[in-house]
Amino acid sequence: MGQRAGRVTIAEETIIQYEGLHDEGQISWILGVCAAGLVACLNAQPTLPKREQLDAEEREELLTTLFDLWKFGDNYGGIGVDVAGAIAGNATARERKWVEAWVREEMRPGQDSSSTWHNRSVVDFVVKLKQAEHASEEDVLKEYRHAGLYKELAERLLQLGRENEALDVAQAHLTEPMEVTWFAEQLLKLGEAWREQALAFVETRLNELKPALQGKSQDFTSAYTVDTYRRWLSEKYLLYGKAKQALDMELVRFQASPDHTTYRSVRSAAQAADQPEEVWSGLRPQLIRTLEQQGRWGALVTIYLDEGEVGQALAALAEMERAPRTSLYGYGYRAEGAPSHYQAQVAEAAEESYPDEAIRLYKSVVQRLIDGRGRENYQQATGYLARIRGLHQKQGREPEWQAYMATLRN
C-alpha cells in the first residue's frame, strides 16, 4: 500500500515539474519504474483478498495516475510500459467509461503529421478499451474512420480479409508516398491476383501528381514524391518481367534528374535479362551526351570510373578543372579546381595506365590538404605522399621525388 502511494506521489509530482527539469533519460526512467510498479499493483488486484484490495477512491487515484503516465509517455516518447493494455484489461466497465472519456479529450484536430501521430496513440487506447468490452469489429473500424486514420483502417480491413474495402479506403484517402507504397506492398503480399491492382494504385497516384510539376521547377516535395513512385514502379516492373515499362520509367527519372544514380538505374533496366543487347549500346551515348551538355562532370567522372574508362574519367575531370568559377557542377560543387574527392579517386584509378596524371592529381590533393592545415588534413596528406613516392620509385624517378619533397618543405 505504501509503495503504491509513494509511486503515485512521485509520478504526479515529477510529471507536474517535468517541463522545468533537464532530463537526459534518468527522469523518464524513474517514471517508467513508477508506471511498471503501478501496473503491477493494478494487475494484482483480482488475486488479493477482499480486505487488501483498493477501495473505489484508491482505484480512481491509481487509474488517474496511470492515465497521466500514459499521457506523459505519449508526449515525450514512451515509458516502456503498456499502460493502456493494463487499464483496459483490469478496469471495471464503469471505470473504462471514465478512462475512455479522458482519452477522447486528448484527440487533436487537423490532419498534420504531428496530430495524426498523436491521434493514432489515442485511438489505439480507445480500441483496447472497446475490445475489453467485447465491442464489435465494426465499432473498432468506426473509431479509425472517425479519427481519419485511414492507413490503420485499411490495415485493419486487410487483416479481416476485406481486401476490396481496404482498396476503396486507400484509393479514397491514402496520398502520402510512404502510405501509398506501403499499401501497394500489402496488396502484393496477397498474391499474384492482386499484383495488377497494386501497380495500378501507385500508377494512379503518379499520374495525379505529374500535372502539378509542370512549370514548377522548385516544387521539390512533389518532385520527390513523383520520383518515389517512379522508383517503386520501376523496381516492381523489373521484378515482374515488365522490362520495357521499367526502362521507360528509368529514362523519365534520368531526364528529370540526370546524374550517376539515375544513369545506373537506366543501365540496370536496359541490361535486364529479357532486354536485347543493343538496347543499352544504343542508349548509353545519348545519356552521356545529356550529361556533357548539362556540364555534369562529377557524374561523368563517377560513371567512367565505375565502368573502368579511366581515360574518359581523366577527360571529364579536366573539364571540371577548366570550368569557370561561377558555374555549378552536377553535384553542386563550385569551381575551385576539381574537388579533391574526385581528384583522389581518379588518381588511384590512373596509377597503372596514367602514372604521370596520377602524380599530378595526388600533388594537387596534397597541396590543398596542407593549405587547409590541421592534424587530420596532414595525416591524409601523408597517405597521398606515400602513393606519390611509390609511383616515382616504380618509374625510377627518385631524384624527381626528392626535388618535390624539398620544394614542399620550403
Image (tube, rainbow, N blue to C red):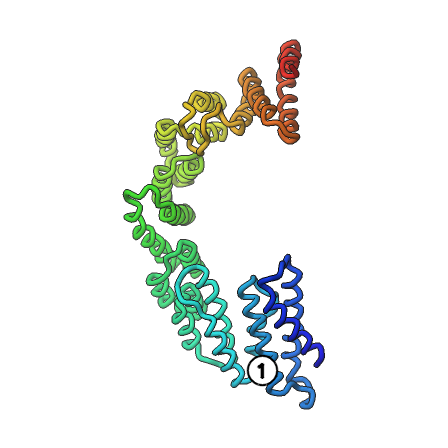
**Screen quadrant of the C terminus:** top right
Q: Secondary structure at mark 1?
A: helix
Q: Residue lying farthest bottom?
A: 51
Q: Residue lying at the far right in this picture: please name it.
A: 2
Q: Amino acid at mark 1?
A: Glu
Q: Is residue 215 above or below residue 128?
A: above
Q: Residue furthest front?
A: 20
> Left or right: where does residue 245 sit relative to residue 23?
left
Q: Is residue 233 visible?
A: no
Residue 389 image point, x, y percent: 65, 18
- The one nearer the camera, 395 or 142, is 142
Residue 271, above or below 389: below
Q: Position of residue 370 (x, y in %)?
A: 61, 24
Q: Is residue 229 above or below residue 42?
A: above
Question: Which residue is nearer to you in this view: 104 or 237?
Answer: 104
Q: Which residue is mark 1?
A: 60
Viewer-proximal residue, 135 or 105?
105
Q: Looking at the image, which is closer to me, 170 or 147? A: 147
Tell me which residue sits at (39%, 28%) in the image.
295
